[in-house]
Image: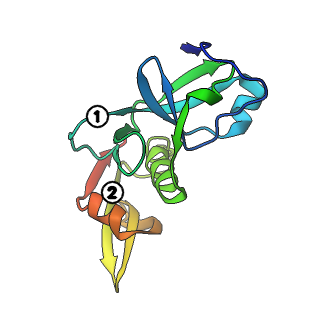
Amino acid sequence: MIYLTTMTMENTMIRQGDIISYQDNYCVCLSNTSIQRYSNIVIVAPIIKSNHKYPLYYPLSGYKVEGLILIDQLKSLEFTSIRSMIVDSLNDEDLANVLHLSKLMFDNERTSSNNVYVRVSQEQGSYYLSKYQDKPRMLLDKKEISKEVYDKYQYRLKLILD
């Protein structure tokens, strides 16, 4: 566990989607404020500067911090209060996409199929992120995304959950 105690400010909460700095590193908060309220912990995904392409690395651009959000490397951070360490905040669309990808790691394996596919598609001028179950082939979730997000993810992802 990493303790964030260098800067304190009373009655401050890190919000879901905030990009924070700690120990010369950056991360984005994925947990909601109710976790902080009762446990003084935030769940974050680290941000690195890399060009590595991996399905659970979400590209981050247009913010004060740019790079890749490592969705598969979540961490719990305990803090006193770190408002002055908040660098930026994700927009609603990027936050929704990051949370959607993070949920893939926590699907119930007992009730879902062994293989889950995620892909982006274009249909009648709109762009979609879709999640499919392998056997039987079934659409589990589909949401509209922007062209910018579509351009970032023009590849198909196969996650083996077993």
* Residue lying farthest to the bottom in this orientation: 124
* Label placed on residue 117: 2
Check disc 2: other Cα within 10 Å, few if <14, some if 14-19, many if 20+.
Answer: some
Q: Residue at x 34, y 43 (%)?
A: 56
Q: Quadrant of residue 89?
A: top right
The residue lying toward the viewer, choosing from 88 and 93, is 88
Q: Residue 27, position in %: x, y? A: 46, 32
Q: Residue at x 68, y 23 (%)?
A: 81
Residue 98 as seen in the image, left or right of residue 4: left
Q: Amino acid at mark 2?
A: Tyr
Q: Residue at x 51, y 49 (%)?
A: 90
Question: Dot 1: what SS?
Answer: loop
Badge nearest the viewer, 1 or 2: 1
Q: Is residue 162 visible?
A: no
The residue lying toward the viewer, choosing from 98 and 131, is 98
Q: Please state, as top left, top right, bottom left or bottom right, where the C terminus lies in the image.
A: top left
* Label placed on residue 49: 1
Q: Please state, as top left, top right, bottom left or bottom right, where the N terminus lies in the image.
A: top right
Check disc 1: other Cα within 10 Å, few if <14, some if 14-19, many if 20+.
Answer: few
Residue 66 as seen in the image, left or right of residue 78: left
The residue lying toward the viewer, choosing from 76 and 160, is 76
Of callouts 1 and 2, the N-terminal one: 1
Question: Dot 2: what SS?
Answer: strand
Q: Quadrant of residue 64?
A: top left
